[in-house]
Amino acid sequence: MGYTDQRFDVNLSILFTELPLLERPAAAAAAGFTAVELWWPWIETPTPAQEELDVLKKALEDAGTQLVGLNFYAGQLPGPDRGAVSVPGAESERFNANINVAADFAASVGCKALNALYGNRVEGVEPAVQDELALKNLVTAARAADRVGAILLIETLNKPESPLYPLVSAPAGIEVVDKVNEATGLGNAKFLLDLYHLAMNDEDLSEVIEKYAAKTGHVQIADKPGRGAPGTGELPLEELLDQLKKAGYEGYVGLEYKAADAAASFAWLPAEARAAK
């Protein structure tokens, strides 16, 4: 058991960011990884030109890397935004314009998980109005994901770093997952269990795993405090991933931590354990 028993992927939106986007898949491959994930790479537009999508697809393929997770358009991320799903007006429209673009790109590269960040609370808008909009948009996204054989991920963040984001506990995320599945009947909405965010919310990580492993579609990790690589903080990440495995989780574990030197930051993981099984 332990780290060598997991299927890891590298989040190329937080690691190797010193390199241009199109060079990051090759850098991950050079470090021994075969699976990667991405936040929506085109912060300025939900609908990039087909040529831009094509060159990213080629970069992934040339590196021999499999994209295993992709965010839908989420506004300025990294930046002040935390998604667009529940944000009325132009952002919600951008999210909707992005849904089929992201789903079709995912299909073109064999990516089976699409993450829809909920979005911050907006001053002057009733939370119930935002939640109603979010459910409508998430239902549309879930259907698009299903069309391409993918799951829809709902992610909880942490309150200290995302004070305006309403989903800051595992139960809050699970509630949205259940509502989307109830509305669509598809059952393809799943929980994105991010151990760093949950820890920052002071949740009982073992209890969350025990309760929600069956509804979890993707896992992300970083150590706390500092959001660094495993071993830089206090979280028993190896034990927690063992617990997830024992609870039946067989999906990918995304490395979504910060490191000044990404290649050097993987020392905690033996080279032979980096290629996804």
Image (cartoon, grey):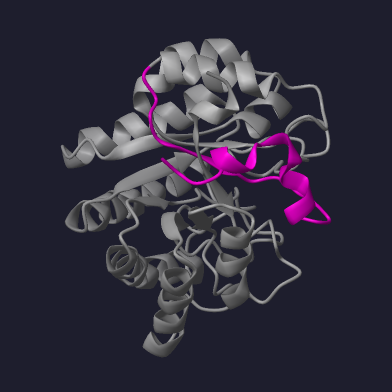
In this figure, what is the number of numbered marks?
0
Locate residue 214, reporting x and y percent.
35, 21
Task: Look at the picture and state if 157 lies above or below 199.
Answer: below
Can you tell which quarter of the image residue 98 is in?
Answer: bottom left
Identify which residue, 44 or 229, lies in the foreground. Answer: 229
Say if residue 160 shows up in the picture: yes
Can you tell which quarter of the image residue 240 is in?
Answer: top right
Is 214 left, or right, of 257 in this rendering?
Answer: left
Can you tell which quarter of the image residue 218 is in?
Answer: top left
Instruction: Verify whether residue 274 appears in magenta.
Output: yes
The residue positioned 58% from the left and 51% from the top of the image is: 10
Instruction: Verify whether residue 150 appears in magenta.
Output: no
Identify which residue, 269 or 155, lies in the foreground. Answer: 269
Task: Look at the picture and state if 270 lies above or below 28.
Answer: above
Quadrant of the frame with the C terminus: top left
Is 152 left, or right, of 184 in this rendering?
Answer: right
The residue positioned 56% from the left and 60% from the top of the image is: 29
The residue positioned 73% from the left and 22% from the top of the image is: 235
Locate residue 119, reporting x and y percent.
55, 51
**Magenta residues (range):** 248-277
Locate residue 201, reporting x and y percent.
69, 25
Locate residue 226, reporting x and y percent.
83, 38
Identify which residue, 268 or 222, lies in the foreground. Answer: 268
Say if residue 12 shows up in the picture: no
Task: Look at the picture and state if 219 lies above or below 82.
Answer: above
Is 273 left, or right, of 134 in this rendering?
Answer: right
